[in-house]
Amino acid sequence: MESQTLKNKQSELEQSKNKFLDLSNDQLIEMYKKMLLIRRFEERCAQEYGKGKIAGFCHLYIGQEAVAVGTIQALNKEDYIYASYRDHGQALARGLDPKKIMAELFGKFTGTTKGVGGSMHLIDADKNFMGGYGIVGGHIPLAAGAAFTAKYKTTGGVAVCYFGEAAINQGIFFETLNMAQIWKLPVIFIIENNRYGMGTSIKRVFAGEKLYDTANYLDMNRNSFNGMDVLDSYNVMKSAVELARKKSLPTLLEAQTYRFRGHSMSDPATYRTKEEVELEKGNDPISIFLNQLLENKVTTQNNLDEIEIEIKKIVADSVEFAENSEQPPIEFLTENVYTD
Amino acid sequence: MTQQLQIREALNQAMCEEMERDQNVFLMGEEVAQYNGAYKVTQGMLKKFGSKRVIDTPISEAGFTGIGIGAAMTGLRPIVEIMTWNFAILAFDQIFNNAAKLRYMSGGQFKCPIVVRAPNGPAHMLGSQHSQALESMLVHVPGLKVVTCSTAYDAKGLLKSAIRDDNPVMFLESELMYSVKGDVPNDDYTIPLGVGDIKREGRDITIVAWTKMIPLSLKAAEQLSLDGIECEVIDPRTLRPLDEDLIFDSVKKTNHLLIVEDSWPFASVGSEIAKRVSTNIFDYLDAPIVNINAADVPMPYAENLENEAIPSVEKIIEEVKNILNR
Ligand SMILES: Cc1ncc(C[n+]2csc(CCOP(=O)(O)OP(=O)(O)O)c2C)c(N)n1
Ligand SMILES: [Mg+2]
């Protein structure tokens, strides 16, 4: 069948690594900027949360930047993206305005959903960024539904769904994969395996070994990639997207990644040893990419320093914009319960 | 002798005491064991009882609730903790179609002594999918008992009764109240299900409320008392079966009724209470019954909108004055 083994993929990747695949220097720099933007944006979110400017549940993407940036790089405008509550990274990678995102987190009317959604529900329909969702696993069938539409209307679009590894334990995961496979829907399911669902290691709550092997039983195309390496993310995603776009076939992908912070702002994350966290931080996806760029002379240290300044300003501007924006008017409370 | 306990500690004691008392009682849910509970209600229980009886589950609410129901119909007495009632919606099929009906459907052959516990209702700025008060969905279903708690004393006594009850009991807590402290007796006590409690006596108006709406109503009552208005605040505690006599007796005395709840207004527990009062003791009412509810919208994230959407001390005071024409 279409299934590829990880081994094949890896050797293929080794060969192409130095060539940076089909990405131009400009694209590579853009990808680097996005990863850095996510990192700096999230660091700032943590600060603003501490100051009480951001409230509720706020799940940071620090450590996982290469997954969103690499995979979204392989998508087109007409493709749909669904994310979990840990959605800042995908939103920024998709090009949602950082100002509007920060304003949303501040609960302001200028935010992505005018302040009603907050951190867990970033949405931008114009960009086919179909949202962050708060119920673990609850958005998996929505992405398959969007793929159903794309196929039905023959738009050529594909749908992508991001969720944490713990979500595969919801029955809806299997239900959806099965229907995606029997109906040949152009959808890509991406398990972001950061190894913990809140305080629980996936090893304690999943009986199988490889998460993406859950697709074996359905004979569905599947693959795994190094989610700390943005080029690997891009490369593996690219073949999955091709399969979806050209042959209308679903794929289950597993990104090996790690979150550097707690589950949410209120989690001290004492269930992981310091050693483990330090070890994983040694695989910082941004440092890895930065070194790849420098070694291959895609850019210079000078350039990177300038990028750092540029990104800092974008983040600072987003906070200023959020601060200076108004809360939603009270009348907005009862708007949009129904379509007129 | 009494001790000062947080509601979370009172719940913890109730579970520990019942697990010591009955080997068939066990606890399962997400993060209940090694993490000591998402809200630390199950702190120390893994250490005390071991992993046979305090069990971390995958994020599979429908599955582990159903496993709990299967265990209950075959002789065990599970306590299933769900992180919040928003997520218990995934298990509503199991609760509605299995737990609630096993007794009836089997012509009385099965019983289903399970407790499903979780915090209910909005906390603070958690947005639409995490801020739902779902008690009216649960009370709708014959076969279920539905219990709430607003003090540490009630929490412990009611949870112990819930665990000993041979029916499926849905137990509703509140994230924002876990740290609220109260006096709890040192000795073994239970509070029967189906019996309400007068939280403050008064002659002018009856306020019926539960969980978070109790402290709010008591605060309003305190302030209104400065204006010479005496509110009787009643906590039914168990919403099904409902202690309607307690409410009727109070309304017969005060002739006025305000119901405060943070769930949506359409077909709410409050509308059922209003219906029963107007059906049974209409002649005692001097004014129309008033319900204060959450706004009839999914909960928004923005702080000003959320504050507007949920009941407040100010809204209660205003409604009481309206009802009494003061
Ligand atoms: C149905 C449901 N159950 C429980 C929760 C509470 N909860 C939110 S995130 C989470 C852990 C999810 O872990 P994972 O899927 O690995 O995603 P990650 O947070 O690691 O990105 C839990 C238990 C929820 N939001 N929805
Ligand atoms: Mg995870």
Image (spheres, helix red, strand yellow):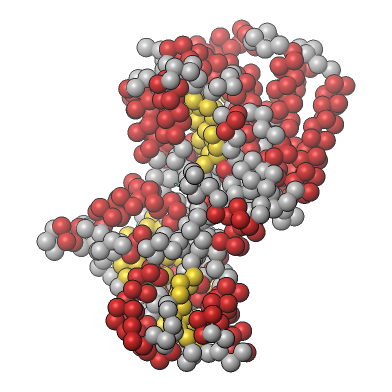
> Where is residue A329 shown, x and y percent of the image?
66, 54
Q: Is residue A179 above or below residue B23?
A: above
Q: Is residue B25 left or right of residue B227?
A: left
Tell which residue pokes out farthest to the front in this image: A340
Residue A94 appears in view: yes
Q: Is residue B80 above or below residue A209?
A: below
Q: Is residue A294 above or below residue B215?
A: above
Nearer the observer, A112 or B6: A112
Residue A213 appears in view: no
Tell which residue pokes out farthest to the right in this image: A302
Identified at 61% across, 89% down, the residue is B227
> Where is residue A242 shown, x and y percent of the image?
50, 13
Q: Is residue B156 left or right of residue A218?
A: right
> Where is residue B36 shown, x and y percent of the image?
51, 57
Identified at 81% across, 16% down, the residue is A299
> Where is residue A303 shown, x and y percent of the image?
85, 21
Q: Is residue B181 above or below residue A195?
A: below
Nearer the observer, A274 or A190: A190
Identified at 34% across, 61% down, the residue is B138
Quarter the N terminus of chain A occupies: top left
Nearer the observer, A247 or B36: A247
Residue A331 location, quadrant: bottom right
**How many numbered discs, if any?**
0
Identified at 53% across, 90% down, the residue is B230
